[in-house]
Amino acid sequence: MKIAKFGGSSLADASQIKKVCDIILADPDRRIIVVSAPGKRTKEDIKVTDLLIYAANAALKNGNCEEELAAVIERFNSICAELKVTEVLPQITDALNSAVSTDRSDENCFIDTVKAMGEDCCARLVASYLTSIGHPARYCNPKECGLFLERDLAGKARILGESYDNLESLKYSKELCIFPGFYGYGKDGRIITFSRGGSDITGSILAGAVNANVYENWTDVDNVFAVNPSLVKNPFPITEITYDEMRELAYAGFSVLHEEALYPVYVRGIPVHIRNTNNPSAKGTRIVSERTHYDSLVTGIAGEKGFLTITVTKYLMNHEVGFISSLLKILAEEGVPIEHIPSGIDSVTIIARKKYFTPDKEDIIINRFRNEARAESVKIDRDLAIVMIVGQAMEKSVGIMARAASALSAAGINLRIVNQGASEISMMFGVSEEYTDYAVRVLYKELFRY
Ligand code: ASP
């Protein structure tokens, strides 16, 4: 059994939806389908999810959102008309109207309820269309199917374990199951959405629940590239990558799937296959637990801005038991996640993301480091980018670090931090933010020139 998830660009209009249905029907193993909300038809277009967010905000601000909702209804109306499934339109308008009429006292909850309707209505539409062309399909409501979520302390949606058991029965459905992505229900019966792009997570959860053979993630590119294609012309395609390599690259801003989408398939060893709705014959990229082949020594290179360093010094630091842990405890109490901690004899550098280390936290943390941990000096540098070179095949191969470092030095890029974990699947360089893209280009040129 395959789980096939289609992204917003694959469902943006009637002709895209026809392509999606052709793909579904081309393989009898594609029994459970997850859909996003219709995305952009052109570069300037607006995604249905964004139209819904405007509508929800207008309702909260002005008390009504008729105009904004009309734009959403019009999108679905034109798709239904072209696919000749206008009979589903009343269901769609009802779902939209009842979402905007729900209780507004908890604003976030209200926004979630409205913005989930893009996926919800799209699933109704695709199910109707498949049925109308002779392939019985049903819209699966996440509440009826038992996809329950909760919010953690940081407000992030998290799946409740029982959902996996509830969703397993989908595999016995006689009809094709069309499941809306992006949202589930809290135990109080109200809708909870994942963060943006979260339909990827729904697909992965369903793949885990039915123990699928593969999770197909259909999008609009032939494959994932070894480097961001906006930085390098015709970059090297990745045909296969491990979950671990993908995680390392995602860490430095390489965005293919939603960050949280890998976990449910990773723990069960279910491969993910990224494929192109507009070119189904392309090979795509497989994300797997064990590689079957290597096309290149390095799998991918990525760079991301937005980091900072906190350098703390204390004479004889290496003799003092518990010094680093006292720093980490303070950061934990201030809600700052830590990325790396390279250390020296009398100093330690903590790397964190700027977005968590807000300027108002800076004074508090510096004072706490000085007063509670008795640090001698604390220096913050807010200009750091991380560049990662990732590749399972680098393990045990000699000389990559030397080549990377000399290419960067020949390009005049100062290496502020260098880190290679014992797993040897990645190397991390810290550079000034202004060099991020340049460093990625330089490394690509050096390491993909075989
Ligand atoms: N429609 C949602 C978004 O635009 C979720 C998704 O497409 O995955 O973020």
Image (cartoon, rainbow, N blue to C red):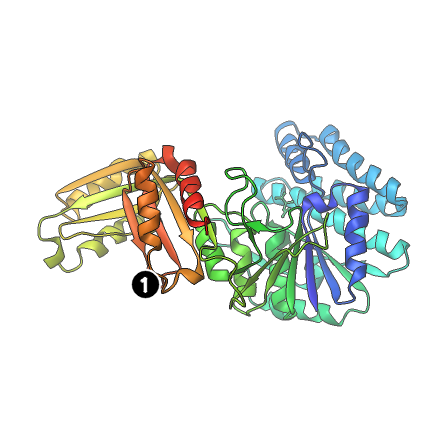
Q: Is residue 110 above or below residue 156?
A: above
- Residue 2, located in which quarter of the rendered image? bottom right
How many numbered marks have been drawn onto this rendered protein structure?
A: 1
Q: Nearer the viewer, residue 11 or 75?
A: 11
Up/down of 57 relative to 289, above or below: above
Q: Amino acid at mark 1?
A: Ala
State whether residue 41 is above or below residue 67: below
Q: Residue at x 88, y 40 (%)?
A: 81
SS at badge 1: loop
Left or right, residue 152 beside residue 64: left
In this rendering, does residue 275 appear at all? yes
| Position of residue 292 measured from the top left corner of the image (x, y, whole percent) | 54, 68
Judge by depth and name the residue closer to the eye, 446 or 39. 446
Residue positioned 56% across, 47% down in the render? 195
Residue nearer the viewer, 332 or 127: 127
Residue at the (80%, 54%) spot, across then down: 21
* Residue that sits furthest to the front in the current view: 450
